[in-house]
Image (tube, helix red, strand yellow):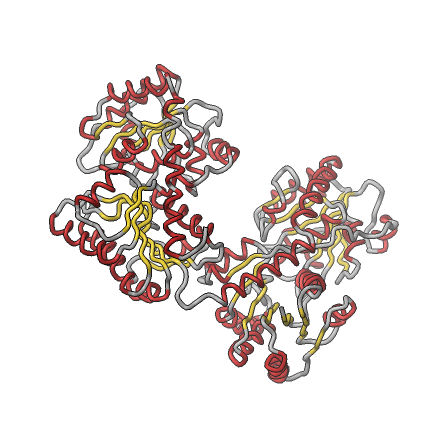
Amino acid sequence: MKIFHVAGGGDRGGAKTHILALCSRLQKEHDLQLISLRSGDFPESAQAAGIRTTTFFSWFVPYDYYRLIRKVRREKPEIVHCHGAKANIAGLLVKLFCHTTVVSTVHSDYQLDYLSSLPKRLSIGFLNARALRHIDYYVTVSELFKQMLISRGFDPLRCMVIYNGLDFQDKAEPFDREAWLRQAGIDYQPGDVVLGILARLTPVKDIPTLLHAFAQARKEDPRLKLLIGGDGEDAEKLKVLARQLKLGTSVSFMGWVTDVKHFFAACDIDVLCSISESFPYSILEGVREGCAVITSDVGGMRRLIEQGESGYIFQPGDREAFARYILELSRDGEKRRAFAQKLYERASQLYSLDSMAATQSQIYENIRHLQSLPKRSGVLICGAYGRGNSGDEAILRAIITSMRSIDPLMPLTVMTRKPRETRLLYGVRAIYTFNIPRFLRCARKTQLFINGGGSLIQDSTSNRSLYYYLFTIWASRHAGAHVLMYGCGIGHVARPSNRRLARLVLDDSAELITVRDSISLDELHEMGITKPTVRPSADPALSLQPAPEEDACQYLRQHGLDPDGRYICFSIRQWKDFDNYQAFAEAADYAWSTYGLETVFMPIEQPSDIPPSQKTAQLMHCRSHFLPAPDYVELTMAVLRRMKLVCAMRLHALVFSAAANTPFLAVSYDIKVSSFMKYVGNPSCCDLTEVTGAFLCRQIDRIMRQPEDYRNYVLRLQALEAENTRAARELLGAAE
């Protein structure tokens, strides 16, 4: 693949290291050139590394851009890959005048660049922010920066992640550490503990927090010394601050450091205090030389460091925590060495040069694949999403996982009440549920429309909901998309006019319907729907896997519960005029007195599930615990797996329990609940209008006496659920 990498040429620090390391490795398998828009150290270093380098530099920037455009037109690279603000502006011009695919690696938060220079912020900073909006694809050097771009409205499909890489075998040669430190201006004595930071001395690096924390720690441990490598507009202000804090010769401002290896080899602890980073190379460089690490919570640091096990992470600006961690590591040499060893082992596996180059090559292949997609492609997913109901979100996550198993790069668009949150949570395109013009535009471009699970075709809650979902099915089919109803619950549709409308629309527009229970199958037959292919399946959420057990244990501990405790979980919802919460209270008291099960209330839909739980708790004699809804459905499932028993009105509390292999009993407020229980063959179900404390207590007895009988109801359904994915493959024309 022919690729031009374009850099501003003033790149220093981590960005320079990334570009040069990446280009030197990529040129072994690609036809690669590096173009620098400035002369000096950067292009000279590139040439010294054996990278084919061209410099376009004059004092008239538009002429440099013109030369770049002319070169692109002449040599026709497949991709122009930009690094930095000046290069991004050039990349936009290349896209406009050459129609070449342009990629940008986002090395920093563009909104925080040039904080100390208002003219630069209003000129190059503004132009860079505008240029980024129109570039084709984005590469970030941490997942956090990808989330940052998505949160600002960038297309998730066009945002990709590559973590920085380093040659961990290329360590500093042995040297006289004591002599080197004294030459650096440090009054070093044997036994002193040396902290080091390499960073631009700019506001975003927040060096004042380091100086204050260091001063505080040094009051208790005078052996501490600090090396500050780097330059920038804040250099003089920081020196003044160091004098005000009376740090004397315990701190050395070394200016820009070229001998990075020996710098970190002279340090015991590598520190970072930035308020924003992508993924700092300076941390990897310190780890390579055997440093322990204390860092602010930025970039991908939590991917590298396990808090308290291999290093320390503090919130940006938290001087107290920073000082505390400095003291802890300064006083415990064994812990420093253990942290350093653990970090080296992890970093050398995850952040090697080979891994970085391989990831970047795969990104180029992904871009080539995306560029080759036909005009009509991808999947548009419609359902009751973005309303805070974890059951609906579980269905959505299951559908997305299923589609990505077919094609990991498949364009996915979700209709949701909360587009921003959906984009961030699932990494998909999202449009507002009732933005009909955007929906119609998407339908004309999509290959497959999915009516996404749940009880969408019913009029129990409202006629409007039924009409909306029927309209989206009809409009999508007539816009040229294939239509799949995915793991649906059908009914109950009560009004005769609504039944006729549903029959007309589904017969006309739906091509394939998979249903999650036998009652839904019967409902379709009774409505006279004959044209679509109808197949039994199961609830899509059954395909999800619970989060790791430790995540559930940590969640329970955070909310004051013993992970090894014995619990019964209640999932109760409000429903019309129902107020017989005494039945649930009696069951909770009985579970405690007979089996020692403490009651836990956990909502599936927050906050609407909270009031009925509170009413039940007020009627109980034993104590109870309230858990907030977990952040994601896999964690909900993992928490339910820690329960001995689940008693639920909510359908997806039952589905999650089934997937987690936890025994469950149901109180049915809707046909979908009783239908699910019938489908799995679980007899422990009672209609809401007939529920009594005595019935619930009998079911608790049955389950607790033979829990294994209740753990095997869903094995058949989990296999049957795969029919949903097979149906999607069929309509997409994908091979097994």
Horizontal side, residue 705 vs residue 337: left or right: left
Horizontal side, residue 198 vs residue 453: left or right: right
Residue 652 % position (x, y): 34, 38
The answer to whether 132 is drawn above or below residue 167 in the figure is below
- Who is closer to the viewer here, 596 or 297? 596
Q: Is residue 370 among the parts visible in the rendering?
A: yes
Horizontal side, residue 538 vs residue 494: left or right: right
- Who is closer to the viewer here, 178 or 366? 366
Q: In the orientation shown, which residue stands out farthest toward the left?
A: 496
Horizontal side, residue 549 vs residue 27: left or right: left
Question: Which of the image's four quarters has the N terminus?
Answer: bottom right
Residue 244 % position (x, y): 69, 54
Q: Which residue is at a point 73% across and 48% down the rendered structure image?
A: 195
Q: In the orientation shown, which residue stands out farthest toward the top?
A: 594
Residue 620 % position (x, y): 30, 22
- Who is closer to the viewer here, 373 or 333? 373
Residue 348 % position (x, y): 70, 48
The answer to whether 126 is drawn above or below residue 708 in the figure is below
Query: How many marks do you count on the picture?
Result: 0
Q: Is residue 606 among the parts visible in the rendering?
A: no
